[in-house]
Image (tube, rainbow, N blue to C red):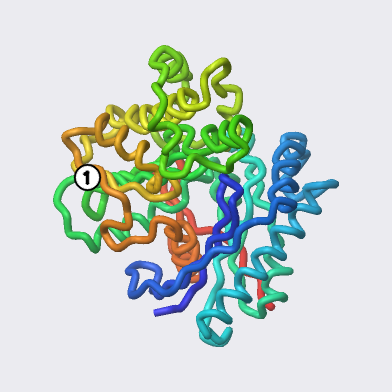
Amino acid sequence: MMTAIGLMSGTSLDGVDIALIETDGNQVAAFGPTGYRPYTEHERGLLREALAEAVNLPRRDARPGVIGEAERAVTLAHAEAVAAFTAQNRIVREAIDIVGFHGQTVLHRPAQRLTVQIGDGTALAKAIRVPVMHDFRAADVAAGGQGAPFVPVYHRALAQSLGREGPICVVNIGGVSNITYIDGADTLIACDTGPGNALLDDFMVRVMGQPFDREGRLAAQGRPDADWIAHALQHPFFALPPPKSLDRNDFASFAPHDMAPADGAATLTAFTAAAITRIVPLLPKSPANWIVAGGGARNLTMLGMLRERLAPATVEPADALGWSVDAMEAQAFGYLAVRGLKGLPLSYPATTGVPMPMTGGMIARP
């Protein structure tokens, strides 16, 4: 078994999740502590500027202007997160075999074989003096894969420990929503399903000056616009079979206008739930159990809408099973780092569309 730290900064731009995990790259032996280092307002502003600028990137290693500035900020934030986490939990660096560093996605264009995660793995390894596995998605995209989602192999390791019969679907609702369909040891299918919290979070910032709709309280006071949702679901993405993936901002133009704040929040929450539901007819069987992770698992209105749309299947938040809602993706990148070290596959034809199972990641040593 190896001891890994995983680091994840998601499309919701809230901060750095960090988690320790013990694994051999197949089974999970133990969960360690988890932590979180929020981005400052300045860092979040830099990242929003970098996202806007990244649409013009000529190649994946270019870091012009604010993108370079954002990369330095991201790297420093992750170094600070590791330093604080190891100090608080009294973990000596010699006890850590590898750190999995996802970085911050600023552009995801798999059709152009382009995915860009900013964050300097070499600088991070030197700062924390531990080997760092980074740039996980590049090999997949270069081989013609979607480069996302990358957490399904970790979801499978978790699901196998439950010993449940029939297909299970793990749905991660971050900035973008994605699902992992698991049916026994052999069937693993994954894809993005559509917007997660990104549209809702952006709406909350714009209309309410708040970063997100805490527990779905605003949406609970509103009424979803069924016509708006039906129109939005006509987007061709929703009819595509898996594997498929999205950029955080692919649905940015779908922001509702001329709606009261509560109705806008309710509409976007219902849109996310409806988009997740649209994947069911595209799966081999209808899942009996849905396990919800990511920020969306904290949104009680979102969970209620999913239960209504997915009945009679069960819908439960990941923490009801003893899994970490907040740190699951960080744990996953610790797990993936160990798999990458061992040359095991990180992505598969039915998860990202690569022609064959692919390992990935680059190792930076201190």
- Indicate the amino acid at tag 1: Asn
Viewer-proximal residue among 195 and 15: 15
Viewer-proximal residue among 184 and 250: 250
Q: Is residue 258 above or below residue 143?
A: above
Q: Residue at x 22, y 45 (%)?
A: 289
Viewer can see residue 349: no
Q: State left or right for residue 67 relative to residue 189.
A: right
Q: Residue at x 30, y 44 (%)?
A: 181
Residue 262: percent from left, percent from top: 47, 27
Q: Is residue 339 above or below residue 276?
A: below
Q: State left or right for residue 19 relative to residue 53.
A: left
Residue 71: percent from left, percent from top: 74, 55
Residue tagged by mark 1? 289
Q: Residues within 10 Å of mark 1 (few under 14, many from 20)?
A: many
Quadrant housing residue 178: top left
Residue 272: percent from left, percent from top: 42, 31
Q: Is residue 337 above or below residue 240?
A: below
